[in-house]
Amino acid sequence: MRGNAPWLKVQVRRKSDLGMNMTIASRHPAIVLLHGYPFDRSMWREQIDFLSTNGYRVAAPDLRGFGESVAQTSVCEPSEIDHRLKSVPLTTMDDMARDVAALMDELKIDQAVVGGLSMGGYVALEFAKLFPARLDGLVLAGTRAPADSEQERQARFQQVEQMFAKGMSGIAEASLPKLLAPRTLAEKPEVVARIREMILRSDPKGASAAQRGMAARRNYSDDLSSINVPTLVIVGRDDPIRPVADAEFMHDRIRNSRLEIIEDAAHMTNMEQPEIFNAALLNFLHDLV
Ligand code: MLT
């Protein structure tokens, strides 16, 4: 445990600091939203606005190494598999989950609904294992429980080498057709531009550290049956990165879960179809109280 994470930049919205509105907000659970890789907290803009307008307290941090949060080197030792990358920093999912708990301490949030997209989902699963008593609910979007195969790990290490050699631009162009559904690519140029810009402004060092951390992540499959908070699993119908089968796998094993499949969306469901994503989130949150 590293104590608090004073460098973790966070965007917090309250409905208002006026008494009446705070009373409304305090009836609702707090929500913590964790971004994917290689993005930052700005990916949750539509959810932060929507949830705070509906009276929820929302915290959306830039995870360690992303956005305005400074890249940190973990104390973890490099594994056998990635020995050639040992000079690259490593941020584990455990590091990020502990950062989230420290942030909640700082914000005086004892319990929250913790939601994450993709890498954010791995962090949410890690958080659920480490701090089950601090969870009011879970939202797992475009993510999966099993660890990487050896081939997937090697692909991550290649991407780390590419990021160090050439920066983020190659990754942005190669990723966009997988992150976004054909309809988003054709009809929502502003979403395409926002995602491209998020990737381009990512710090290669922070992104590499997280890539190594994802390669080293645990297999969460056996944890799923122990999750006993209400859980919303969300997936884009056209997601080639974390397809519907990954979402069904989690939904089948998490007792109190519901599954939302979003049409005309791939990996970035919350940005591609924000109204549908927000409606699913709000229904889920309403049913918690
Ligand atoms: C993400 O969007 O966070 C990544 O696709 C996660 C991953 O690479 O496994």
Image: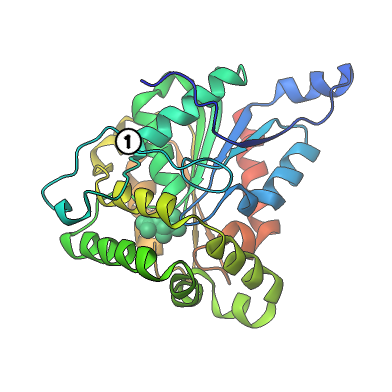
Residue visible at 80% across and 39% down?
Answer: 53
Q: Is residue 229 visible?
A: no
Residue 286 image offset from top left, x and y in percent: 67, 35
Residue name at image x 34 percent, y 29 percent: 129
Residue found 32% across the figure and 61% down from its top: 160
Side of 126 where 153 appears, left or right? left
Q: Which residue is outermost to the left? A: 80
Badge 1 amino acid: Ser
Residue 34 placement, left or right of 57: left
Residue behind label 1 places its C-beta within 8 angstroms of ligand 1: no
Image quadrant of residue 92? top left
Residue 29 in the image: state x and y as whole percent: 63, 26
Residue 93 in the image, given as x and y percentages of width and height? 35, 40
Position of residue 82 relative to residue 93, above or below, is below
36 in relation to 97, above or below = below
**Quadrant hosting ligand 1:** bottom left
**Structural crowding at the residue carrying mark 1, measured as other residues with C-alpha within 10 Å and reported as few (<14), some (14–19) or many (≥20):** some
- From the viewer's side, name the closer residue of 1 and 185: 1
| SS assignment at label 1 | loop
Query: Looking at the image, is 275 positioned above or below residue 75?
Result: below
Residue placed at 56% from the left, 42% from the top? 62
User: From what the image shows, is residue 76 above or below residue 88?
Assistant: above
Q: Nearer the viewer, residue 266 or 178?
A: 178
Residue 201 in view of the camera: yes
Residue at the limit of the structure toward the bottom, as seen here: 186
Find disc 1 in the rendering and name its residue: 74
Q: Quadrant of the N terminus?
A: top left
Q: Nearer the viewer, residue 66 or 256?
A: 66
Residue 280: horizontal and vertical position, in percent?
62, 49
Which corner quadrant holds the C terminus? top right
